[in-house]
Image: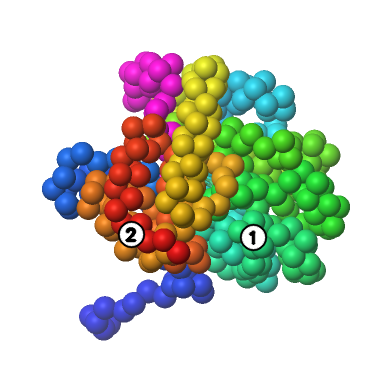
């Protein structure tokens, strides 16, 4: 037997993907730069944090942390079913909504299957398709927005799934109800459509599509939503999928038995009750959006109007350089080169004082176009 180390060969495609780049944690930036006063506007987290009711529930459930969680998330599922006006067999609870995307891959996608998503869409669709050995079919956006007619044109008889982020991260743009209806009329019945609605609770646009009817009509359709964004529970990892019962039943055995931890389940249940906290978060976001738009206008910076809790803004210089310079001033934002926008950054809409601090750091670095 040779003692020489042999390289293990991963499945085809694995070596073409990169690990997901999250926003840098505040503690890491503190360590690296030796500055203590840092704000993070890089990962679309809720700037006012979890609901106080959720924090109470977290403390309570921590006392039971030695028990395995309820693997079927019985109570949370019941609460959610009521909240959404769906049946419990139309729901799957997951470790962040990201896990639904992964379950789609593990359950349905393999070599020979084509997976359609947009260029400049949330990067996880590419990861899922590649890891499963499926073939990514990447369709360009138009006006920084998913262009559903082109995505429909990309469908072949090998197409298995189509991922759509609505609104999209990082562009913040959405497809309308009319566009969605037209698209769904063109999608063959056997193709699975996934609408990723992580920012659903932030959207205020009157033309935003309500996609639940596609689930009710038993189309091959999955909606993903999350407690990570407006509910402020990103650190606990809890999200869900809404789909026809046959799809839920098919995916359910594929997930880990205890994929949703008990503390997260308790926090999510409490969060659903706190409608005031959701409203407060929506209002803060709406006000911060207007405040930042006005400031960008004054600075002569182009930005994309957002339906989420973040804004993509074009900075007329490499976004990575600007993000680095901002970081040195204690403000963490995200560079967007990885999404095909080398001259842009994405900033999460923060609290008023955070938005002001962000602008204070940005203004001296601005180059007009
Ligand atoms: C943040 C985000 C998610 C949610 O991720 P979780 O796993 O629920 O934390 C999903 N899709 C998009 C487009 C996102 O921006």
**Region in magenta:** 43-68
Q: Quadrant of the N terminus?
A: bottom left
In the displayed structure, 76 sits above or below 128; it is above
Q: Residue 143 carries which label?
A: 1
- For label 2, the crowd category at 10 Å Cα-Cα, with few meaning under 14, some 14 to 19 and many 20 or more, is many
In the displayed structure, 157 sits above or below 311; it is below
Residue 291 appears left or right of 111? left
Q: Nearer the viewer, residue 250 or 78?
A: 78
Q: Which of 304 and 159 is in front in this view?
A: 304
Q: Nearer the viewer, residue 177 or 153?
A: 177
How far across and how far down the image is residue 358, in percent? 34, 43
The answer to which of marks 2 and 1 sits earlier in the sequence is 1
Q: Is mark 2 on a helix, strand or loop?
A: helix
In the displayed structure, 28 sits above or below 287; it is below
Give the quarter of the image for residue 235.
Answer: top left
Q: Is mark 1 on a helix, strand or loop?
A: loop
Number of numbered callouts drawn:
2
- Ligand 1: does it lie within 8 Å of the C-beta at label 1? no
Q: Residue 322 carries which label?
A: 2
Residue 275 appears left or right of 36? right
Q: Do the residues labelled 2 and 1 touch (CB within 8 Å)?
A: no
How far across and how far down the image is residue 30, in percent? 19, 45
Residue lying at 27% horizontally and 57% vertically, measured from the top left: 325
Residue lying at 36% horizontally and 50% vertically, measured from the top left: 333
Q: Residue 128 carries which label?
A: none
| Residue 65 belongs to the span the image colors magenta | yes
């Amino acid at each position: 037997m040779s003692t020489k180390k042999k390289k293990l060969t991963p499945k085809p495609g694995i070596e073409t993907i990169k690990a997901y780049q999250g926003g840098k944690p505040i503690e890491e930036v503190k360590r690296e730069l030796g500055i203590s006063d840092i704000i993070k506007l890089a990962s679309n987290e809720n700037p006012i944090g979890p609901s106080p009711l959720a924090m109470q529930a977290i403390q309570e459930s921590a006392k039971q942390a030695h028990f395995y969680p309820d693997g079927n998330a019985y109570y949370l599922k019941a609460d959610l079913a009521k909240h959404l006006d769906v049946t419990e067999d139309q729901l799957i609870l997951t470790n962040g909504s990201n896990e639904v995307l992964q379950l789609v891959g593990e359950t349905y996608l393999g070599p020979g299957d084509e997976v359609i998503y947009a260029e400049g869409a949330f990067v996880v669709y590419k990861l899922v398709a590649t890891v499963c050995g499926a073939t990514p079919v990447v369709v360009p956006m138009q006006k920084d927005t998913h262009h559903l007619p082109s995505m429909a044109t990309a469908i072949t008889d090998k197409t298995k799934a189509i991922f759509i982020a609505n609104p999209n991260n990082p562009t913040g743009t959405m497809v309308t109800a009319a566009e969605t209806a037209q698209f769904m009329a063109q999608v063959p019945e056997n193709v699975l459509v996934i609408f990723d609605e992580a920012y659903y609770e932030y959207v205020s646009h009157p033309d935003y599509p309500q996609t639940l009817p596609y689930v009710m009509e038993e189309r091959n359709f999955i909606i993903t939503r999350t407690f990570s964004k407006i509910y402020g529970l990103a650190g606990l990892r809890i999200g869900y999928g809404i789909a026809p019962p046959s799809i839920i039943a098919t995916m359910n055995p594929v997930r880990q038995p205890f994929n949703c931890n008990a503390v997260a389940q308790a926090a999510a249940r409490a969060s659903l009750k706190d409608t005031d906290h959701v409203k407060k978060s929506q209002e803060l976001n709406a006000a911060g959006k207007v405040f930042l738009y006005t400031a960008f206008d004054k600075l002569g910076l182009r930005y994309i109007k957002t339906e989420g809790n973040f804004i993509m803004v074009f900075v007329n210089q490499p976004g990575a350089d600007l993000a680095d310079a901002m970081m040195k001033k204690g403000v963490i934002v995200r560079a967007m080169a990885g999404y095909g926008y080398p001259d842009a950054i994405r900033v999460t809409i923060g609290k008023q004082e955070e938005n002001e601090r962000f602008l204070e750091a940005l203004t001296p670095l601005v180059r007009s176009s």
